[in-house]
Amino acid sequence: RSEQLDDMFAKDVKAQGAMAVLLRDALKPNLIQTIEGTPAIMHTGPFANIAHGTSSIIATDIALRLFDYVVIEAGFGSDLGAEKFFNIVTRAGNLKVDACVLITTIRALKEHGHGVLEYGFSNLEKHVENMRNFGVPVVVAVNKFPDDTDEEIELLRDHCSMKDVKVVVSEVYAKGSEGGISLANTVVETIDNQPAKSIAYTYDLKDSLETKIEKVAQTIYGAKGVTYTTGAKGTLKSLTKRGYGKLPICIAKTQFSLSDNKALKGRPSGFDVEVVGADVSNGAGFVVVYMGEINLMPGLPEHPAAEDMDVDDEGSISGVF
């Protein structure tokens, strides 16, 4: 925005031509292949904790024209990538969703259970509940690690069975496509036998920005309520006055908790989330809402995978997988 607080656009700084040059080819999805030679489409890489977390609608549209089944990754959990996929992406792309594959791990459930597997089940239950509330059937995929025991996996199976949730062990990382055949078959069977309903959006686009925020916080996160800093209140009021109040919202918050506090594990209750700011991504078509302490410029971990990659004198690559 300008010093006069007016909205500024690319044309105001005469950058629209240069941006169009960059976007001409960048708008084209990338056709890549897996290590087994299977074609895949990769396009854009937004983080789901600070952005919407899915590939582009252009990539999805192309995939739907070419393949019988299209699998789209929605980053992190049902509170982030999945919520935004349903409330933002499916609306923008007029997409129908046939099923949801909810990926979990034994170690993640232990993390949310403070080291006890059973205590972490409540976190998984909330994610399943969120997906079912959108009107789609859910299949839980257990991404198996070498140190997972059969007893732990059976304990998870038994718990999900009591909740009428399908569970399939995925060993794609260790075995490639062979390790995912059971999961693929289960997903296809689910699509054939459990037709998805029309998507039940969390909020109506006609709702105020504050109402949208509160509906997501209470329905998806399980929050008791929402608080706003003085600055956030003023920004939301300004965004509404400037004509952005009917856009969908994209909440930026921690990925480590259903709340806005990364220390709250499992399925927390009785908590409030705090809105500390907001902005508009006008080109993308949504209002970004900032909650809690969130790093909007995430960097690499302390030991990036790139540090282990190398090429020897014979030209052989190591450290990639």
Image: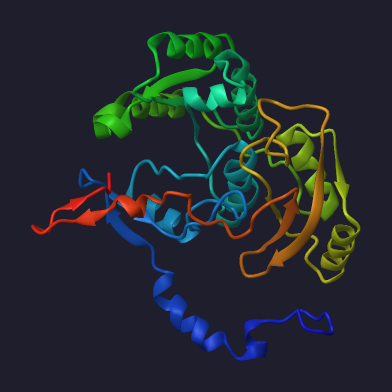
Image height of 108 relative to 159, above or below = below
Q: How many numbered discs, if any?
A: 0
Q: Quadrant of the N terminus?
A: bottom right
Give x and y (percent) for residue 162: 57, 8
Residue 198 visible to the viewer: no
Give x and y (percent) for residue 283: 62, 70
Q: Nearer the viewer, residue 78 or 139?
A: 78
284 sits to left or right of 195: right
Image height of 279 relative to 52, above or below = below
Q: Quadrant of the C terminus?
A: top left
Give me the residue at 64% from left, 20% from top: 122
Picture quarter containing residue 177? top left
Give x and y (percent) for residue 103: 48, 31
Residue 293 visible to the viewer: yes
Give me the residue at 48% from left, 12% from top: 157
Q: Nearer the viewer, residue 199 or 239?
A: 239
Q: Nearer the viewer, residue 259 or 246?
A: 259
Give x and y (percent) for residue 150: 38, 11
147 sits to left or right of 14: left
Picture quarter containing residue 5? bottom right
